[in-house]
Structure formats: C-alpha cells, structure tokens
Amino acid sequence: MKLVKLSLVAALAAGAFSVANATPLDEAIKDVDLSGALRYRYNNGRVVEHNRDNLFNGPGGIGNSKQAHQFVGKLGFQAAIADNFKAFVELYYNAGQESGFASNGSEIGTDTNTGFNVRQYYLTYTADAVDTSVLLGKMQVESIWTTNFLGLVGTGAKILNTSLEGTILAAYAFDNFDANSNVRAGFGANGVEGDTILNNNRFVNSMTYNPYSNNLYGVAGIGSYDLGFGQLNSQLWLAYLTDTAFLYAIDLGFKTTFANDLVWKLNLGYLGNAVENDFEDIVVGMPGAATNGNFVGLNGTLEYMGFDASLGGFYYGDKDQLSLTTLEDNGNIGHLLAGQEIYYTDGSNLTGDIGQNTFGFIKAGYTFNEVLRLGVDLVYGGTKIENNALGSGAGDKFEVVARVNYKYSPKLDFQAWYSYVDIDAQTKANDNSKNSVRLQALYKF
C-alpha cells in the first residue's frame, strides 16, 4: 500500500532537520510502498515418552515446546530511486520461542531485547520494453524447494521475464544463504534460518561440509493457462547446488467447474535430484551414505456448496541411505501434503533423512459464509529403514489434525489446529505419540 502523505509533520521535520541539498521528507516518501506482515503464534507440544524425544526432533516442528509464544514482524519499504530502478529493504523482528518453560523445565521468559534486523535488501531494474526485471542483492530464494513467508534468504541475483502471456520465466544465482545450525557451532554462523538439515541432530555433527556454503544456480518456468474447459497451472524447476546435487521438479495443477457449483482440482508433483560425490560421502566414516532423492505426490479435491474433500498420497526417501527432497522446511509443496507434525519425526524429514516414506491422506472440511472453515486431516503410512538403522525412525505412523480457520478480513486471519501423531515403531521400545496445539493470528498488508 502507499504511505500516506503527511504534509504538516513532513514540513516540520524537514524544517528542523534540513541540510543543504536535502530532500524534504514529504517528497522522499511519496513514491515509497509499504508492505509487510505481523504474526503471533502460540505453540504447545507434549511428547508422551519424554525419554524418546528424539523421535520428534526434526527442524521446523513444534517439538516438545511448552507454552511457546512467537512474535514475528516484517516491514518492507520499496522506493523508486530513478527511472526503472527500485530499492527494497525489509526489516525483520523475531522474538523466537518465548516460553514459560524450556524442554528441560527451565524458564525462558519474555524477550524484550530482540531488535529489528535487515532481512532483505535488493535493487530492481525493470526493462519495460522486454518485460524483464533484474533483482540484485539479498533476497528470498522463493523456489519449489523453499518456503515463501519466511523462506531461505540468499545473496545473489534473479532475472524475471513475463513477455509470454500467462508465463513467468526466471533465472537465479545465489552464492550464500542464511541457513544456520543451532546444533553444530560454525555451520552458517551468520544465518537465522533453522529449518534445514543443519539442525537435524542425527546427521549434522557427522557432516563433512555445509551444503549451504555453496552456490545455487537455477531456472524456472511458471505458467497459468485457460484451456476453455479448465485452468492449468504448471511449474518446471531446474537447479544446481554446487558439489551437492542437481535438482529438478515439475508441478501440475488442473481445476474445472461442473454445473457452476461442483469444483474438481487435481495436483501432481515430482521433485527429484541427482547427488554429487561430495554429498554422497557427507557423513564421516560412511562412504556412499547419501543417494538421489525422489518425491512423488498426488492430491485430488472436490468442492461443493462449502464442503471440500481431498484424497491423496505421497512417496519419498530411501530406506538405507540419506536423501533430501527440499532445501528448507517442507518447501513450497503444501498443496501435495496433509497433516502438520508427521514430517518432523525421525526418518521423515523432507530436508534430509534416512527412511523410505509412503503416506496416504484424507482431508475434509466445511466453510461457513466463505470465512470460517472447520476441517480435519487424516494421514496414515509408514517409514521403512533397512535393518531399523539408527534405531528409531522405522514403523507405522498416523496423524490426525483438527483445524479451524477464520478469515476476518482480506488482510487478517486466524487459525488453530490440534495434532495427534502416533508412531508404532518397528522396535517396540520406540513406540511413542505426541500432542501439539497451535494458535495463530496473521495480518498482512
């Protein structure tokens, strides 16, 4: 949205602080766009068998949090600084997991010391004649392997072209990232992004190198097309993470409407990669410890008069070698998944794990007056690990999630969910379950 022109305040400020050749404040801000988000989360998780907490230690999950409050703020400023040039700066606030109690029972307390940091800082040049924009600086990667709201940030460049109707063509290159490890000192010490393999307790202390210290190069094509009888959305991604892996992905979505009321959607996605020698030997003392990754997901949805129902499934991982599907958290494939916490159990982490995972799911819900949705997810499947390697990840897994979503306005929405995960482990001594609750308020502008 545009900043309001504050003529009186601007005049007073300019008169008080002006120096020779300074730009008056009201003139300086008239071409500035303000965007951002404010998010509050309350997380509470309880692992039934506390001596087996490692079953739920995947980066990105709620874990064994108790009364954890998280306050996040993003404030972005975009200014036109010259013909065809714009500069963008995003300030970021994250108070972390404030809690009355840590997982070991000690108090954490309320954080009043954390300040705003610069999270994104980049320059955009737009060549209107060829429908092309070039971005240079520190920015979110925003790929199918990373999330978008608070996704992985890198320093590099992007080129975006929209000359083909309904299609975005992109090329990008990054030479470092903000991935960090809270487990192993020195791995990405300057970063803040923790939802990566660098925070997987089972591997990071034995890793021979940090994959996020390498360069990422890639191209993508994203399209949306009206076929007359339905809408087709497509994504094609290719990338190379130096000395780690070639990554490739295709995502297809189709939507059509019958008799004006019945809507049918079908989503199909495949994410694969071919690892290089450095990543194959990434675990100390285990030559060939890692292998190529493959993810396949399918989801079909029917919507009618406020009701929605989905049926789908997905497969990924290897039963005796480490493989990865995403570069950060669950990537940008939420439309192919269901549930919440099952992906953070041992053997099932999409960011990298040992385990062959097969899951099927059912989702259903009803939306009242287009603003309040009540729904439930059921996910069932399991993780296979050769000879139950590493001791804890193999077995049948089940999750049920009850959801409430309320869209108060186009900019403000609330959500709450309860998750129950049960692990019927291959080794019975590792059977476990977990209860999790999240309450969230999100305001975007």
Image (cartoon, helix red, strand yellow):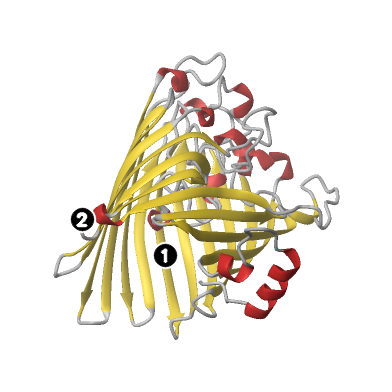
Q: Disc 1 or 2, which lies upstream in sequence?
A: 2
From the viewer's perspective, tell me whether residue 258 is left or right of residue 310.
Answer: left
Answer yes or no: is residue 348 visible.
Answer: no
Amino acid at dot 1: Lys
C-alpha separation, residue under disc 1 versus residue under disc 2 = 36 Å
From the viewer's perspective, tell me whether residue 141 is left or right of residue 187.
Answer: left
Answer yes or no: is residue 405 visible.
Answer: yes
Q: Secondary structure at mark 2?
A: loop
Q: Position of residue 201 (x, y in %)?
A: 63, 33
Dots 1, 2 in contact, CB < 8 A: no
Residue lying at the far bottom in this picture: please name it.
369
Look at mark 1 in the image and give the residue it sits on: 363
Residue at image point 73% right, 64% down = 17
Between residue 435 and residue 291, name the one nearer to us: 291
From the viewer's perspective, tell me whether residue 300 is left or right of residue 21.
Answer: left
Residue at image point 73% right, 44% down = 50
Q: Secondary structure at mark 1?
A: strand
Between residue 92 and residue 234, name the one nearer to us: 92
Hey, which quadrant is residue 240 in on the image? top left
From the viewer's perspective, tell me whether residue 205 is left or right of residue 267.
Answer: right
Amino acid at dot 2: Leu
Q: Position of residue 252 (x, y in %)?
A: 27, 54
